[in-house]
Image: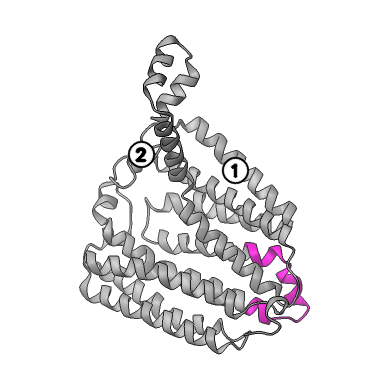
Amino acid sequence: MTQLVAQHLASPSSSVIADAGTLPHDSIRRSILADASQLVRPRIAMMVLVTVFAAMWLTSGSRELNWFSVVGVLFGTAVVAASSSVANQILERDTDRLMARTALRPLAAGRLSNRSAWVLVAVGFIGGSGCVWLAGNLQAAFAAMLTWILYVGVYTPLKKITPLNTAVGAVAGALPIAIGWLAVDGPQQLLAGDIAASLAVAALGTVLYLWQFPHFMAIAWLYRKQYGLANLKMLTVTDPSGLRAAGQSLAAALAMIPVSLAMAIPSGSIRMFLTAALASTVYVLVSVNFAFRRDDRSARILLFTSLGVLLILMTSAVAFSAPKILTGSYL
């Protein structure tokens, strides 16, 4: 439908007016909003913003945050993330057409031209990076650009080459932690001898990296047939038994236990320690379930549990390692 709207704008003829008259404005608006949502993938962008904010919050320590800077960095990061999503869909438009879950995306379905999409990518990349620079600093902007390059320029093409694409993609998924840390002068704090905040951020970044393996292996299992039709080298395609995918999921979940517990060390928070222990243990249990069963039901349980675990860990990291400016002391 958005393609029809674009044709209307490009060719203002009497037939266009007639066609436009037959289309309810609400339907057109909903279709455009749906296409925009598919392009920028707001749920992924929201996860990125939560990680950036968590890193800024933890790094700030007892110093008061500049909320203008926080909002600016988050906005710029969101724009860069949207740009990377559009670029990813440009590069994958042919493979997207081969999979039911992605065939109706605007670029794959032909509702948006490559030229228009590249304009959006360029504006988002330059504008978003510039916003991170102005609101934060140049180092944070470089981290945002590096995340974009790694996701679009390395991870995306690797999906057609090797199952190692997940490991590379997980780096891109964890790098937003560095954006937040750099934006509030984390390196300067570290050099000044304040290692507690940097340790908390490093633990959080490592948790985020490891968390992605069970999460994406569950997705790869559920859509393994579609990935196979698109000739994408996901681990569940190269190893249809699912043993290697299950092994990676379980190994990453197990590694998350000590790393997530380390998140409690800088603040000394018992609540952070107990929450991390519970969440990471549950993640291990559902990963074990997937490893033994390797069916769609266990994969869905792992997928939905992964989202809950991430939400709990991120919320706990912020709440239980909160700056003194709001709590009066570390919880």
Q: Which residues are magenta?
A: 179-199
Secondary element type, mark 1: helix
- In the image as oriented, which residue stretches furthest toward the right? 192
What is the distance, in whole Å, between disc 2 and disc 1 at their CAs? 23 Å
Which residue is more in the foreground, 308 or 252?
A: 308
**Residue 202 position in % (x across, y down):** 59, 75
Label number found at residue 94:
2
Judged left or right of residue 234, residue 260 is right
The residue at which mark 1 appears reads as 124
Secondary element type, mark 2: helix
In which quadrant will I find the C terminus?
bottom right
- Is there any visible trace of residue 136 in the rendered image? no
Residue 60, by quadrant, is bottom right
Judged left or right of residue 149, residue 281 is left
**Residue 242 position in % (x across, y down):** 25, 67
Which residue is found at the position 48% from the left and 82% from the top?
276
- Is there any visible trace of residue 178 in the rendered image? yes
Which residue is found at the position 37% from the left and 53% from the top?
161
Which amino acid lies under the numbered mark 1 shown in the image of this protein? Gly
Judged left or right of residue 78, residue 289 is left
Work out whether mark 2 precedes mark 1 in sequence or the reverse, and give the earlier one. 2
